Image (cartoon, helix red, strand yellow):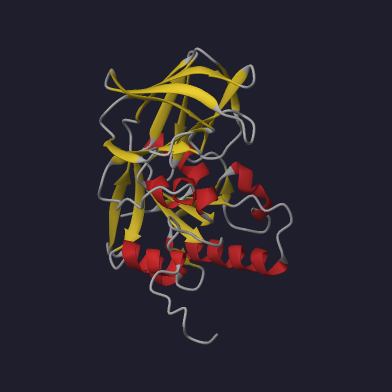
Amino acid sequence: MFKNVGIVIKNFSNPSSEETTSIKNLINILNKHFNNVYLDDESSIFAKNSQIQNKEFSSLADLVVVIGGDGTLLGAARKYHKHDLPILGINMGSVGFLTEVTVNNFEDAIISILNGDYEVEERSLVSASFDGRIIHAVNEIVVHSGSYTQLMRYKLSANGNVVYEKRSDGLIISTTTGSTAYALSAGGPIVHPSIDAFTVLPMLSQSLSSRPFIISSDKSLSISLIGGSSDMGMICADGQDDISIPYLTDIKISRVKKTLKLIHLKNNDFFEACREKLGWSLDISSPK
């Protein structure tokens, strides 16, 4: 049973009065149903006049509630997944594959969860290690040339076996979760959440036969950067800030041991989300 909840709220630069009211209503609902409610420090703008404790809650909370969109949830996941805290996403964004609960059904969802009517789904993260540092991503690791319309050359290996050597704008290594994010926009396949795999997707390859492929996430990948049009290549996780990386560097890609734990209501349906978020099964011949 969840008794203590931590809240992570989207970093609104200038929230509207409607957004502020909605978020405070959500906080009041959490105060009503939980013994202790903690607010992530980055969300302190909403702590005023609320009966919540503004502190780091990784050792205090049983559940993390993320209010925002998928981007907000990705940030919370990178920060809190190592503490084995389950995360529930509340959608105040646009697409929201990960944030399935809405503002309108929030209290009903909380009551269902407290009554045990929920499931915990575990999702794998991906890590990239290079130059003595490690970065983690929920959606994808992207290695790229750093410039639009500029190619880079690299060699990809899997478990020590060479897969190919290519020239392209870069390479996307996507998790199953990321298959409905940037990788989807780049032409990758949608992977069902029950399949634990990486999608490997060249970006604008100089090869007519270049295609994405899917590989089990228990395989280790290596990307050897051979050269490009500039002095350095770039790497980023989940669309965060680019990190410069010298050519002739090897990047090791692997699955993170600790999984992300997502809370879903028992009536959650992945294909319903695809129909709703991606416009599947729309009758384009019908008049608007």
Q: In which quarter of the image is residue 197?
A: top left
The image position of residue 149, as x and y in percent, is 62, 35
For the view shown, which residue lies furthest in the bottom direction? 287
Instruction: Answer left or right for 55 relative to 212.
Output: right
Against 32, residue 173 (above or below) is above
Q: Identify which residue, 181 or 266, lies in the foreground.
A: 181
For the view shown, which residue lies furthest in the front direction? 208
The image position of residue 23, as x and y in percent, is 59, 63
The image position of residue 269, as x and y in percent, is 31, 65
Of the 4 image quadrants, the one containing the N terminus is bottom left
Instruction: Answer left or right for 264 relative to 58.
Output: left
Q: Residue at 25%, 46% (x, y): give it.
A: 195
Instruction: Answer left or right for 173 relative to 11.
Output: left
The image position of residue 237, as x and y in percent, is 51, 34
Q: Identify which residue, 64 or 129, lies in the foreground.
A: 129
Of the 4 image quadrants, the one containing the C terminus is bottom right
Q: Quadrant of residue 42?
A: top right
Against 10, residue 110 (above or below) is below
Q: Residue at 50%, 53% (x, y): give it.
A: 70
User: Quick check: can you spot residue 62?
Assistant: no
